[in-house]
Amino acid sequence: SSVLGALKAGQIAALYRLKQTKMVILALWLCFVFSATSSADEHTVSICIDDWPPHIVNAGNERPGPMTRAANQIFKLAGHKTNVIWAPWQRCIENVKLGIWDTSLGWSKTPARLEHLLFSRPLTTSYHLFMSLKSSEFDWKEWVDLKGLRIGMTEAYSYGEAFEEHRSKGLFVTETAQTDSESLKNLLEGRVDVFPLNKDTAWSIAKKNLSQEEVTMLALHPRPLSKNRKTHVIFSRNKRGEVLMKDFEDAVAGLEESGEFSKMFEYLRH
């Protein structure tokens, strides 16, 4: 019985050693897989965007607009692959803040955003104009002219410090929609009196989302809500974000020296 017991003990010890060896091999394999995945992810930049014609166009094809193509080209030059993610703007900015996604395109600086995000050098400059129904004969010269109006807004957008200041004072009331197209429909249905749109995108958005008859009902006031506002690429405010932004900035600097950076945004000068 002692011999049998010794044999059983030896078998148990052998099985234990075999199990331990398998666990070590499994652990090493997992480390290799995670290391390879981490290495791949390190060089793949996730870019969150939403429809913003003519800069960014979600048309169900592989031509996502000139601003997206420019960003892809810049990151490629910096040695990174890109993964474009389509999501509402609010989700884009929140997930970049949290570090879930790396970047998003076309954002203006505000004090609140600067607390949580890194901003690249500007890509473009633009400003907002009020769109209204022609039948309303809307006009404005000073902010006081907007007193009592119902003004449409799009979620996650910034319309400048002056707009926010007068909104907080109750000069006018606002109605927030998730997208520009929803705000335009609110305008057509009389739920808002005016709606601010980026001057470069206003008619592109209207023509894409409305019928030709509806577009002819609209007017765009020439007076801007604010001076030219710069738009940037935003990055997560963390170590990875700092590295990616430096890579992006270095690549842009090289393109500016060659004149290629300016050519990327020629569409805005036509």
Image (cartoon, rainbow, N blue to C red):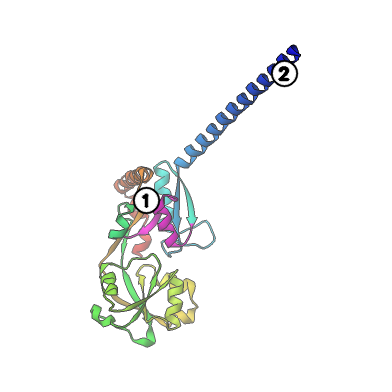
Q: State the residue lying farthest toward the top.
A: 3
The amino acid at mark 2 is Lys
Name the residue: 36% across, 87% down.
136
Q: Horizontal and vertical percent for residue 236?
A: 37, 50
Q: Which residue position is annotated with label 2?
A: 8
Element on which disc 1 rests? strand
* Residue 170 image-quadrant placement: bottom left
User: What secondary structure is marked by label 2?
Assistant: helix
Q: Is 3 on the left-hand or right-hand side of 125?
A: right
Amino acid residing under circle 1: Phe
Residue at the spot x=34%, y=53% of the render? Answer: 117
Residue furthest to the front in view is: 1
Q: In the rendered image, is residue 84 in sight?
A: yes
Residue 63 or residue 157, whichever sits in front: 157
Residue 30 falls in image quadrant: top right
Total labels drawn: 2
- Quadrant housing residue 50: bottom left
Taking the magenta stretch, the answer to whether it contains residue 100 is: yes
